[in-house]
Amino acid sequence: MWDASLPPIVVPQWQTPHPDLTLDSQVLHLWWLTLPPDVPSEVVLRTYLRCYQPNLGEKPLPRAAGGKPYLDALEFNWSHSGGLAVLAVSGKAAVGVDVEILRPCPQRSAISRRFFGAALQQKVWKGGDRSFLQAWTYYEAWLKAQGIGVWQRTAAQPLEHWAASFPVGDRAIASVVVLTPTAPQCFFFRPESMK
């Protein structure tokens, strides 16, 4: 059972991406993307990864044993839900991100009992659907940072990490986990703001 305090909720200041997307060990870039309905999600992901690796080819991205896509010399993770996506790109530390559209979650008690410890179940029960989705996105981001999926959770390690949750507009919540004990400098990018 996973039992953790919920991370703080930060209020991002979404901005147009900088021309220079240099990463160092203490920088985290978070992108809010709208997925075009007629473009495969891997094509969208590759487009944004080219901001960091301009020579990225067209081959499918390699995947770790747990299914997480990866590139040499670039730590990233992404998640999508309901036509929006969040991409996290870290300077050096492994990163995981998850986003969920805010919605009623009639099965939250059953899911919480299966995956969460007693203290976290209590927080979810008191906080309702939004607290459940915050806990779930944090849980998934924590697993994804380690390169494992929900059904491989027994392989997860209690590693030191930094985490935060944040709204994505008024219709979604996301959480990010970086496997570092110190808070990175976060930049929140929304390319759609350029239009």
Image (tube, rainbow, N blue to C red):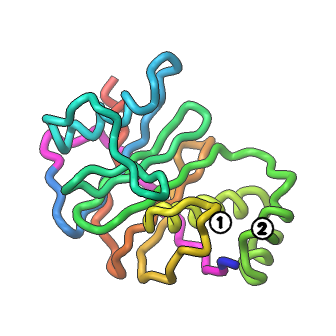
- Location of residue 169 in the rendering, given as x and y in whole percent from the top left corner: 54, 42
Please indicate, yes or no, whether residue 82 appears anywhere in the rendered image. Answer: yes
Q: Is residue 32 left or right of residue 166?
A: left
Q: In this view, does 121 lie to the left or right of 169?
A: right
Q: Are marks 2 and 1 in contact (CB under 8 Å)?
A: yes
Q: Name the residue under label 1.
A: 135
Q: Which residue is at 51% across, 57% downward?
A: 166
- Location of residue 168 in the rendering, given as x and y in whole percent from the top left corner: 52, 46
Image quarter of the N terminus: bottom right
Q: Name the residue under label 2.
A: 112
Q: The disc labelled 2 sits on which kind of residue?
A: Ser
Assign a secondary structure to mark 1: helix
Q: Badge 1, how many Cα within 10 Å: few under 14, some, many 20+?
A: many
Tell me which numbered mark, 2 or 1, is placed earlier along the sequence. Answer: 2
The CA span between labels 2 and 1 is 9 Å
Assign a secondary structure to mark 2: helix
Q: Which residue is at 80% across, 77% downward?
A: 122
As for residue 6 lying within the magenta part, the answer is yes
Q: Which residue is at 61% across, 75% downward?
A: 154
